[in-house]
Amino acid sequence: MHLTQIPTLFAQMTTPDDLVREAARLQRNYEFLSYGLTVAWAILVIYVLFMVSRGRKLKREIASLRAMLEDRQKS
Amino acid sequence: MKDKILYLLGVIAILILARDINVIARLPNEAQQGAIFKIIFFHVPVAITAMTAAAVALVASVLFLITRNFRYDALAVAVTEVGLAFLAANLVTGSIWGRIIWGQWWAWDARLTSALVCWILYAAYLMLRRAVEEPTQRATFAAVWSIFSFIDVPIVIFSIKWWRTQHPQPVFWGGGSFPPDWLAIFLWNMLAMALLAIVMTVVRVRQEDAQRELDSLRRTAHAM
């Protein structure tokens, strides 16, 4: 087979089924790209939310302990 | 770092990332891999950020062992936790890319396995910290573990050079190249990830300071 025949072979392969398969492949590619970005963002967002909740808890505990210590010193 | 500057950096990072997602969506598909190739704009910056975080944790751990200053211990734990989140994002995006390109979610090749081991080692670092009560002992054990864990980082980075792996060679460091406009987007994303990691680390360091204050208040309350 000569190399010059390859484009002809490709032309023969471009049937409606091939086009449908290619469209499905592209669609799947986009779907997985969106999954990837969504999951990666979700991991970072969940971590930030976790950090925010920990920060709030720490502030609350420090405030309550300080109040308790002040009460004890007064009494 | 002042609160306003910190939040401003965070907002800048998020704006850059939001803008880049829009720009990346409009880029043409890569000739062989199609749209999934665009995951590289997220996958590689999070990996570089995670590896940098591991290097910072190493330096902070060594400095803690030398100086016994708890600020370094706080920095080490903060940067390790942030790096772990970024490495998790890296592993997940890589796995999703592999499902399309390789037809499988995971391959036990040197790069993927060493990256997973790296994640487990640094997760163990955080677990170890929870297991030890006494602060000085906790910081010392954790610093030693962090230094030990860093051995895996060069293996993760160079595994694709040292061994034949299923993971592709890097674009910039393996003879490939990006079109200039793609490179610009990649570098912007890299900057945004770095800013995000810095903001998260500073917030986390402050929480460690607050935790130390809380421990000290508890000791005072206990003594009274």
Image (cartoon, rainbow, N blue to C red):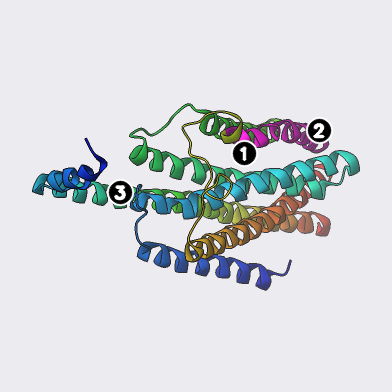
Name the quadrant containing residue B116.
top right
Q: Position of residue B173 (x, y in %)?
A: 59, 47
> Counting other residues with Cα less than 10 Å from the Cα at mark 1, is it few (<14), some (14-19), or many (20 or more)?
some
Tell me, yes or no, whether the two marked residues, 2 and 3, touch with CB atoms within 8 Å. Answer: no
Q: CA distance from mark 1 to mark 2?
A: 31 Å
| Protein chain holding label 1 | B
Which residue has dot 2 on it?
Answer: B137
**Residue B157 got which mark?**
1
Q: Secondary structure at mark 2?
A: helix
Above or below residue B208? Residue B131 is: above
Foreground mark, 2 or 3, reads: 3
Foreground mark, 1 or 2, reads: 1
Span of residues in magenta: B132-159
Q: Residue furthest top?
A: B108
State how many labels appear. Answer: 3
Q: Amino acid at mark 1?
A: Ile
Q: Earlier in the sequence, mark 1 or mark 2?
A: 2
Q: Residue at x 72, y 70 (%)?
A: B2
Q: Is residue B53 left or right of residue A5?
A: right
Q: Amino acid at mark 2?
A: Gln
Which residue has dot 3 on it?
Answer: A29
Q: Nearer the viewer, residue B41 or B1?
A: B41
Same chain letter for marks 3 and 1: no
Same chain letter for marks 1 and 2: yes
Q: CA distance from mark 2 to mark 3?
A: 50 Å
Q: Amino acid at mark 3?
A: Asn
Q: Is residue B100 left or right of residue B204?
A: left
Q: Residue at x 44, y 45 (%)?
A: B93
Q: Residue at x 75, y 41 (%)?
A: B58
